[in-house]
Image: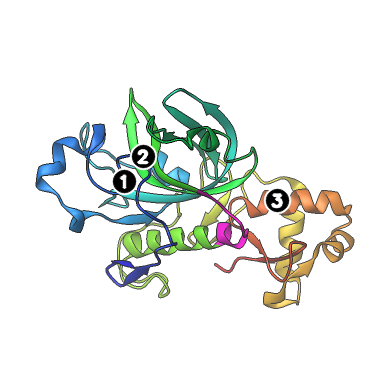
Amino acid sequence: MSTYGGYTRPSYGATGGEDGGGFVYGGSQGGSQAAGKGYIDETLRPVTIKQLIDAEQPYPDANFRIDGVEVTQVTLVGMVRAISPQTTNVTFRLDDGTGIIEVKQWLDADKHDDEAAKSAFALDQYVRVWGRLKSFNNKRHVGAHVIKPVADFNEVNYHLLESTYVHLFFSKGGDPTTAGGGGGGGGDDSMFVDGGYGAAGNGPNLNGASAKARKMFNFLQTAENGNEGVNIHAIAQGTGMTVPEAMNAAEELIQPGLIYTTVDDETFAILAY
């Protein structure tokens, strides 16, 4: 376990790096800093892809900063949109609903399981990545230490909630559960919103959402099923949509974390703000 002040981070069961870099300083990003830093300076922060895209880098080769806080290692969850096997690495394009970023998993010529690594994941499969944010030729990517498939979709929702928790901890100060207290976080949670729609500090932002997604969201807002959620068939009937239309609307709302599945994959509820 590691902590961010009052926030305690679970370990996720990840093991050390498999790419030769592991969880230590080294390589193009941290080589110049290796002498002055040790394991005690290492952190692992859950993030969205938009946070990685917007992260600040004070000068070349410096560690990136998110919410004004230096980050070394990050973990993210996203859907595999493209796979590009190379001689020395496999490049994945990951999409988490807030943005798209490349993730590079370097191959070890001395290991015999690299061919399996090249085909370990499928398109449109959710994966969790542990690694470092890097920049090469002014283009950002994540150098992956570990990539594992997501077996339970609840992990996707959990990751968004955990990323939000840490973001609020640093941007608003103190305990994120005491909304509005302290800090200088501002009104919108830009870790989600990227010219589209996502979670906002004072409630959901549906800008860019389709008419059917808005209709479904509004229906769920007035539903009386509470935390148990509403089944997709009841949603379709209540909104005048077909079940496939309702499922498409649900997928559109799930991506930015506006709704989540509850008792099964066909029952949905609004994420509380």
Residue drawn at point x = 63 percent, y = 39 percent: 122
User: Of the residues under marks 1 and 3, which one precedes in the sequence?
Assistant: 1
Q: Name the residue carrying label 1.
A: 22
Q: What is the number of the mark on residue 85? A: none
Q: Name the residue carrying label 2.
A: 19
Asked whether, in this view, residue 73 is left or right of residue 268, the answer is: left
Q: Where is residue 90? Give x, y as percent.
A: 48, 31
Q: Is residue 155 magenta?
A: yes
Residue at the left extreme?
36
Rendered view: 122 above or below 239: above
Mark 3 to mark 2: distance in Å? 34 Å
Mark 1 to mark 3: distance in Å? 35 Å
Q: Secondary structure at mark 2?
A: loop
Label 2 packing within 10 angstroms: few (<14), some (14-19), many (20+): some
Residue kind at label 2, given as amino acid type: Asp
Q: Is residue 247 magenta?
A: no
Q: How many dots with numbers?
A: 3
Foreground of the two, 224 or 228: 228
Q: What is the number of the mark on residue 251? A: 3
- In this view, the mark in front (3 or 2): 2
Label 3 packing within 10 angstroms: few (<14), some (14-19), many (20+): some
Q: Quadrant of the C terminus?
A: bottom right
Q: Quadrant of the N terminus?
A: bottom left
User: Of the residues under marks 3 and 2, which one precedes in the sequence?
Assistant: 2
Q: Where is residue 146? Give x, y as percent.
A: 43, 47
Q: Which residues, given as a range, are shown in magenta? A: 148-157
Asked whether, in this view, residue 17 is left or right of residue 112, the answer is: left
Residue drawn at point x = 67 percent, y = 46 percent: 209
